[in-house]
Image: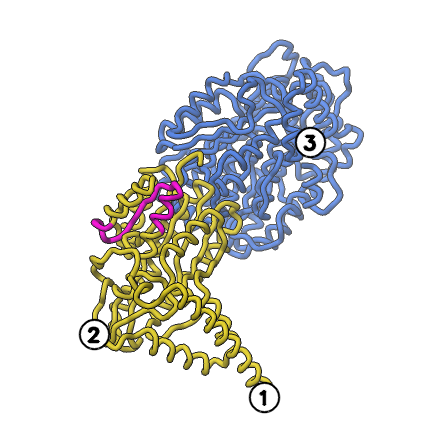
């Protein structure tokens, strides 16, 4: 994926940015779609049947090593922190979209469902959050998070000094990181200002009167404030739970400050800059607000279904993908209704099942389950997914997952794409753009059913939200 | 054939449609035969069964979108798929263009053009869902060259060809979905007897006439090995050649004379809307013209005559062009 990203950006590769990450994968899926392409191998592996079958044969140890090595290769040395330049990242992002006017632009949280909404609206997305894996000394034990927190002070100071528009969320999660914490630790950076490059892109691509959608995932996490713009987050969604104790948790200072969740949450401070730019460019700001990353999935699924029916598409097929297994191009080509799950955990299975309980039945259900190559805690047994697949009236199948193997593997990243293309024969045209007017008429017609809210922007409301958040910080 | 293929044919109660139903039945397809004439369809179903295949009759008026959609739904409900959809139902209208009733013109457009449009819109979504399918539009050689006194019919046939080509382009990304247009020359079907006629004279087909079984075979072949367009009968090609090389005024006069001389009987008839609004009771495959007009040999002789005429015309055109003064 790195290569593809760089090729599209047409610039010098920022070696510090993680590619095996939600933001990068979603950015790749969306920009490729907007530019008329699909995403083979989830964007970072060649689409080879042979490679997929060979990877499947790897032993557990080999797969662990492979995963760890990928982390090491992507990690930046702490001595090189002064090379990180957030504008360079912004250029990478904006360079991924072909130059043309758009009806809307989205800014904010990473979110798989939102990628499908962005694809429908053909609205470029400018992420707020990026991942920088940082290599740490080998002697640091993964069971001592407080050592990681202290060690990170110095590289963080350099990073933040050089990039005053960034906030660092240093994330530590032995479950999600395994086996990478032995080699790297995760710095998630959030943009608190748009920066020159994002502003230039918006001004050049969004005609006056255009809409800026702000993806405002309000998921918070109790963090420890290390410095003014430096937060330490122990655990993460899909990994160690908030305030959960685990063996060897160590002596981490109390996590008493609710901050936007490092990977998915939106930091409202960015609104100030967006509001200024909107005033200057005569843009309309629309907030897309939700509490949990998976909350918009039923909304987006039903929007697609509604849209398909208007387009006289017979399809009654659900394509549920998890984490970075998403491909708007083939979703449209196969006339599938997308449903995004954060991970393939029990909670995600429950969320999908809850949606199926309330939606019209589907004839076909396909599942693309994320597999990082190692067994992770919290994954439900295969039978759990089989029960969901059995709800399809005609056909329910896993895509990309070897049904004979309970344990996940890297080959999934290749196979899910090949299966998506080859096992679903249906072929529908890539649709024209879903207009904002159509989106609004869907919201008006069906919006009340969903927990996701579309709100007009009100600066006073934002300021009050930020103030309330500060109040919580001081009292907690 | 691992799974029985399914073909839907509109206008299957007589003529090309009925012959095509027989041909597909012989090839093992399940035939879903549609037409306004339910009784005739029952006989078609029986004939298909005798050919060794299962068949289904669906009474449908192709001018009604709901009927065509219901036809697709019935085919899907009965067989679970549609492999081939043949838009064939057509009517014709003879008469001096400005003198024929406007309502009849509309009816011809509704049957020949909207019928095909509804058919395509009913079939293609199923093809997309299956990832495969062949739409065959039975147009005519008059789609490529005009013919006097059937202007509306010709316009719809040209529109069908344009529809087919446009759809073929729209679906060009889909490896297994095809749109084919068949352009038959004059075929021995009851179409001319059933058609609306305001010329005051009886109608006979202009020579040469080809049997519907030949068209049916080509349709079945093209459904199995799709190609975008195919002519049936040599006159179509010869006329095209002549049209390309002859001076246009000369060509127009020649065609008009040929039609006046060969297409009309000397009998006097009252103006009639024919089968435009009510289906004809005559549900035969052939129009009986072939036996009436030609033997096989004379047909071949006519082809040779047309070949000579075409070559002479080309030669004449070249001479005229060479002698024409240079235009500034």
In this rendering, the label closer to the viewer, 3 or 1: 1
Q: Which residues are magenta?
A: B20-40
In the image, are marks 2 and 1 on the same chain? Answer: yes
Q: State the hue of chain A.
A: blue
* Label 3 and label 1 in one chain: no
Task: Tell me what hue chain B is rendered in.
Answer: yellow
Residues behind callouts 3 and 2 on a single chain: no
The residue indicated by pointer 2 is B269
Which mark is drawn over residue A320? none
Mark 3, mark 2: which one is toward the viewer?
2
Q: What is the number of the mark on residue A132? A: 3
Frontmost residue, A134 versus A471: A134
Assess disc 2: are there few (<14), some (14-19) or many (≥20) residues with their C-alpha within 10 Å of its C-alpha. Answer: some
Mark 1 — residue?
B323
Q: Nearer the viewer, residue A241 or A111?
A: A111
B232 with respect to A237 (left or right): left
Return the disc, 2 or 1, that comes first in the chain's sequence.
2
């Amino acid at each position: 994926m790195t290569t593809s990203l760089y090729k599209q950006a047409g610039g010098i590769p920022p070696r510090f940015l993680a590619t095996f990450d939600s933001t990068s994968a979603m950015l790749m899926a969306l920009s490729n779609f907007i530019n008329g392409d699909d995403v083979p191998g989830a964007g970072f592996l060649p689409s080879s049947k042979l490679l997929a079958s060979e990877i499947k044969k790897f032993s557990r140890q080999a797969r662990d090593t492979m995963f760890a090595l990928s982390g090491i290769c992507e990690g930046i040395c702490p001595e090189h922190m002064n090379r990180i330049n957030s504008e360079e990242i912004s250029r990478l992002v904006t360079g991924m979209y072909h130059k043309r006017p758009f009806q809307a632009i989205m800014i904010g949280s990473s979110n798989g469902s939102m990628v499908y909404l962005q694809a429908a609206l053909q609205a470029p997305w400018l992420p707020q959050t990026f991942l920088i894996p940082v290599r740490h000394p080998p002697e640091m034990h993964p069971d001592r998070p407080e050592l990681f927190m202290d060690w990170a002070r110095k590289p963080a100071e350099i990073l933040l000094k050089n990039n005053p528009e960034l906030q660092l969320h240093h994330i530590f999660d032995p479950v999600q990181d395994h086996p990478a914490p032995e080699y790297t630790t995760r710095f998630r950076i959030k943009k608190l200002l748009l920066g020159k490059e994002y502003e230039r892109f918006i001004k050049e691509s969004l005609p006056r009167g255009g809409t800026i959608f702000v993806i405002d995932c309000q998921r918070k996490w109790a963090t420890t404030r290390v410095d003014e713009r430096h937060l330490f987050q122990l655990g993460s969604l899909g990994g160690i739970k908030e305030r959960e104790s685990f063996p060897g948790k160590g002596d981490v200072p109390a996590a008493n400050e609710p901050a936007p969740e490092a990977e998915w949450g939106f930091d409202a401070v960015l609104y100030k800059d967006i509001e200024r730019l909107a005033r200057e460019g005569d843009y309309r700001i629309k907030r897309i607000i939700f509490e949990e990353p998976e909350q918009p999935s039923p909304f987006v699924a039903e929007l697609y279904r509604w849209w398909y029916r208007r387009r006289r598409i017979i399809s009654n097929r659900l394509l549920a993908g998890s984490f970075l297994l998403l491909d708007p191009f083939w979703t449209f080509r196969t006339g599938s209704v997308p449903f995004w799950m954060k991970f393939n955990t029990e909670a995600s299975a429950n969320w999908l099942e809850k949606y199926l309980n309330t939606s019209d039945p589907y004839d076909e259900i396909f599942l693309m389950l994320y597999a990082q190559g190692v067994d992770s805690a919290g994954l439900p047994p295969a039978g759990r997914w089989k029960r969901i697949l059995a709800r399809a009236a005609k056909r329910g199948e896993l895509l990309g997952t070897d049904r004979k193997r309970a344990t996940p593997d890297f080959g999934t990243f290749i196979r899910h794409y090949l299966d998506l293309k080859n096992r679903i024969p249906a072929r529908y045209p890539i649709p024209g753009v879903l207009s904002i007017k159509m989106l609004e008429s869907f919201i008006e017609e069906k919006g009340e059913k969903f927990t996701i809210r579309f709100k007009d922007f009100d600066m006073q409301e934002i300021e009050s939200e930020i103030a309330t958040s500060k109040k919580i910080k001081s009292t907690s | 054939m691992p799974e029985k293929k399914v073909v839907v044919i509109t206008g299957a109660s007589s003529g090309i449609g009925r012959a095509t139903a027989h041909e597909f039945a012989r090839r093992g397809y399940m035939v879903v035969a549609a037409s306004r004439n339910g009784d005739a369809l029952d006989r078609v179903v029986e004939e298909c069964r005798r050919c060794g295949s299962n068949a289904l009759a669906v009474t449908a008026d192709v001018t009604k979108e709901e009927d065509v959609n219901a036809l697709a739904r019935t085919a899907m409900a009965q067989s679970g798929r549609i492999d081939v959809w043949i838009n064939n139902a057509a009517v014709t209208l003879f008469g001096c263009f400005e003198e024929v009733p406007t309502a009849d013109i509309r009816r011809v457009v509704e049957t020949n053009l909207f019928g095909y449009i509804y058919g395509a819109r009913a079939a293609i979504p199923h093809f997309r869902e299956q990832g495969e399918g062949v739409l065959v539009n039975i147009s005519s050689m008059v789609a490529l060259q005009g013919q006097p006194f059937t202007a509306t019919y010709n316009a719809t046939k040209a529109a069908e060809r344009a529809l087919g080509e446009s759809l073929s382009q729209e679906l060009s990304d889909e490896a297994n979905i095809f749109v084919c247009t068949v352009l038959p020359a004059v075929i021995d079907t009851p179409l001319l007897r059933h058609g609306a006629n305001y010329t005051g004279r009886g109608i006979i087909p202009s020579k040469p006439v080809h049997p519907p079984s030949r068209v049916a075979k080509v349709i079945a072949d093209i459904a199995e090995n799709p190609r975008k367009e195919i002519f049936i009968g040599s006159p179509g090609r010869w006329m095209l050649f002549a049209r390309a090389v002859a001076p246009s005024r000369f060509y127009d006069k020649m065609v008009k004379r040929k039609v006046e001389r060969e297409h009309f009987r000397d009998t006097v008839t009252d103006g009639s809307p024919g089968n435009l609004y009510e289906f004809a009771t005559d549900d035969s495959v052939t129009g009986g013209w072939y036996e009436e007009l030609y033997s096989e040999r004379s047909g071949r002789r006519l082809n040779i005559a047309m070949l000579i005429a075409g070559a002479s015309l080309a030669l004449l055109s070249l001479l005229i062009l060479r002698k024409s003064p240079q235009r500034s």
